[in-house]
Amino acid sequence: MAATAPGVCWVYAVAALLLGCCGVALASGVQDQAEQFFRSGHTNNWAVLVCTSRFWFNYRHVANTLSVYRSVKRLGIPDSHIVLMLADDMACNPRNPKPATVFSHKNMELNVYGDDVEVDYRSYEVTVENFLRVLTGRIPPSTPRSKRLLSDDRSNILIYMTGHGGNGFLKFQDSEEITNVELADAFEQMWQKRRYNELLFIIDTCQGASMYERFYSPNIMALASSQIGEDSLSHQPDLGIGVHLMDRYTFYVLEFLEEIHPASQTNMNDLFQVCPKSLCVSTPGHRTDLFRRDPQNVLITDFFGSVRKVEITTETISLDSNLTDFETKLPKDELATEPLKYAEQLPVAQIIHQKPKQKDWHPPGGFILGLWALIIMVFFKTYGIKHMKHIF
Amino acid sequence: QFQLTVPVAVIFAPGSVPGDLPRPLPFRDEQEMEMSVNLRTSVMSRYEMTYRSTTAQEEAALDADTAREADAALSPLQDTLLGSLTVYVVPETSSLLPQGISIYVGKHRSAMVRAGGGLATLHMRLQQLTQVMSFTPSSITAALSDRVPDNLLSLDARRHLKSSLGYEITFSLLNPDPKSHDVDWAIEDAVNCYVQPVLDKLSLLANFSVDSQILYYAVLGVTPRFDKESSSFLLSAHSLPHVINPVEARLGSSAVSLYPMLNFLLYVPERSHSPLYIQDKDGAPVNTNAFHSPRWGGIMVYNIEAPASSQASFPLHVDVDMVRVMEVFLAQLRLLFGLSREELPPEFLLESPGNEGLADWELDRLLWVHTVENIATVSTTLTSLAQLLDKIGNIVIKDDVASEVYQAVASAQSAMAKLAVGHLHSAFQASKEAVTSSERAFFDPSLLHLLYFPDDQKFAIYIPLFLPMAVPILLSLAKIVREARQRKKEPTKMD
């Protein structure tokens, strides 16, 4: 008895110590997580979303891009920080049975072309040259601000490209291509000029992994929908619209993103697991060797959303308020002047009570005349000319 | 290799000369300190100290009652060269400085130090003082942040505004509940009276332009919690980052200009959510009721008192107290630029700059940092441009691009030379010109290189084109050569 009591006490003491340690570890873990939240070092977010295919049967590429646009806007990046390039217009395409809509799911559940889509580069403006100009910043001075990528060294940029591609290239508008080496050089130019802090590159094309093979600039993370030699497949056709609505990889990425809200702590490793081979048929790939941080610590909202670092303002300065020359303001209620009225634009009363105008009679001309002449000729041909005496 | 020189004049008042001076007054001395940023970049800071004793006029000025009056009287007697410092050493028993304060920093470029403790303490205090008033190693490495390996730099260093040729400032009033509050702010007068003096002082640094707007029905992104104890609504610190985004889309920041934008928002909460206070991490309400985001701007919440009688007619007419608002906004503007007064040791007393917003030496601090940053940017830009040209052989450089490059190089060299001598003003102007020229050269639209030809593609294109054409040409050349040789041999044959 005497031996077990101190034994029990000893066990209790050890258990209490372990619990205490766990508590401390948990608290410091929470502290660490809070600090890691601030470790990305970016202050603003940009997104460059590119759809490179034209023609009605490439509806799914436009739907892909618009779905990513919608998620990115929902998570907080404003239009002024998104460069959206769509190579063709599906919403107002004459072949669209539901005009002004672009659906991303069959049964028309989700219209991704809502009321506030702002397309910066449209139709034939989406070329390799314009895309590279946007990335490297070598834009003619007359370009409006919405068409520029004004990122700085503390910007995280999301670049999403979709379309038709092959081993080492991506097709633009069915007439030109961008190669993976050009893309890597463009990113290197961006890095030299410190136009990004971290870059996330997502590509959804056939053989997409070939496009990120040649990157050599630091701080780039890349995701692709298929490996070299594999094709990316589309998700499902809609029988009402008649084309395939989305690509598989982007469809599942979207489902994943719909569950993210601006304060969520989901990290990149979850995004890497998004579309396994059983669902996607192709094998998605990713590349993180150029990225400085561990993907475990990278939040989805670091790239897809715009969560800003804030600090509480604790300092103030003191100003003297007794300064002269404050102009006297005009009194708020102005004196009523004479009532103003519009001049009559249309003589409405006259129009309403108008009688229909008599039309003058014109003899039949043109087609009617020719038709009647034909009938008469046929009649007389058939029945002979002696019947003309019935007329005269 | 940067060399930054700060001319410092140390003036000893009678009775304050330490006993162990190395040489009799007046004399000059130099102190150097080297900071190495990475393998190829190092910054040498040199302080040229001139020691002398006071003149009669300065003695008379130092006889004033308070430090502030003495400072005001002394300022016309100094040379106000940008970047230079003047330090007056007063005797230990002097009553100019209050108790417990040993260093007083004035509004202009001068300071007063209490003597005592010999030369070593004096040197230490002088070093502290010069670091506060001109630049510190951390501020210089922050300016050169893209050359520093990442893990050595603290995260705080990267959040100040980058050096730019101009800034765009927008003041916005957000009124989500116009039915209850009819808010009126005299922004134009407030900008002219309070903001414009600060911007005039900063105009040496960059061009500023100011706009203002009023947005109705603009709500914050988060719903504040109701706190029963204080019967007020609270916004906790971790929900603050999500406040900005829904509003930003409506701020119209894309329409205005290409310069970086600073947004200052004044939010008047709805009647159903009044009063609204911001909580910091410890749960205490913030006394300024404002927060700011680095490189973006600041938000302040302005609470309206509920009307005393319940029969007040809505909408209530509210005149915003612009002095309180502008105090916070200008403080946020200073913090965004990196001028903070909180990290000083306790024996310092800083003179408040009053309506000008910032003291002359704070402007100098900004100028030092921005000049170094500009020169570093120029050298990085030009180096990468040179690398681009080496790698891609067939880019055509137009004449004006070439002239911009030459001008950038010349301006950068002159800026470095002037920094080494200590002329801060002309160094800053030269660095601004250098940055403008180098950006224009680098971002010229004609430099876009699209003609990438890897070797295997080159063969694939040119061989099918030229090989069939080349076969008959080569064969006929061979035939000609054979015939020429035969003709040479024939005379020997014919004999």
Image: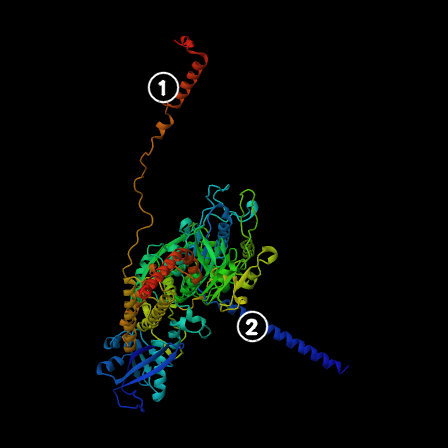
**Mark 1 surroundings within 10 Å by alpha-carbon count, few (fewer than 14), some (14 through 19), many (20 or more):** few
State the residue in front, B47 or B176. B47
Q: Amino acid at mark 1?
A: Pro
Q: Position of residue B285 (x, y in %)?
A: 47, 65
Report x, y in % for residue B225: 52, 59
Residue for badge 1: A363
Q: Identify the image quadrant of the C terminus of chain A.
A: top left
Which image quadrant for residue A32? bottom right
**Chain letter for mark 1:** A
Q: Nearer the viewer, mark 2 or mark 1?
A: 1
Is any part of residue B423 visible from this angle?
yes
Q: Chain of mark 2?
A: A
Q: Residues within 10 Å of mark 2 (few under 14, many from 20)?
A: few
Q: Is residue B460 above or below residue B63?
A: above
Q: Earlier in the sequence, mark 2 or mark 1?
A: 2
Q: Position of residue B439 (x, y in %)?
A: 33, 64
* Farthest right residue in view: A1
- The amino acid type, in three-letter code, at marker 2 is Ser
Q: Which structural element holds mark 1?
A: loop
Residue B142 vs residue B250, the one in the foreground? B142
Mark 2 to mark 1 CA distance (whole Å)? 99 Å
Q: Is residue B340 left or right of residue A10?
A: left
Res. A262 in view: no
Quarter-of-image position of residue B44: bottom left
Mark number displayed over residue B382: none
**Residue A28, numbered circle:** 2
Please identify the quadrant where the N terminus of chain A is shown.
bottom right
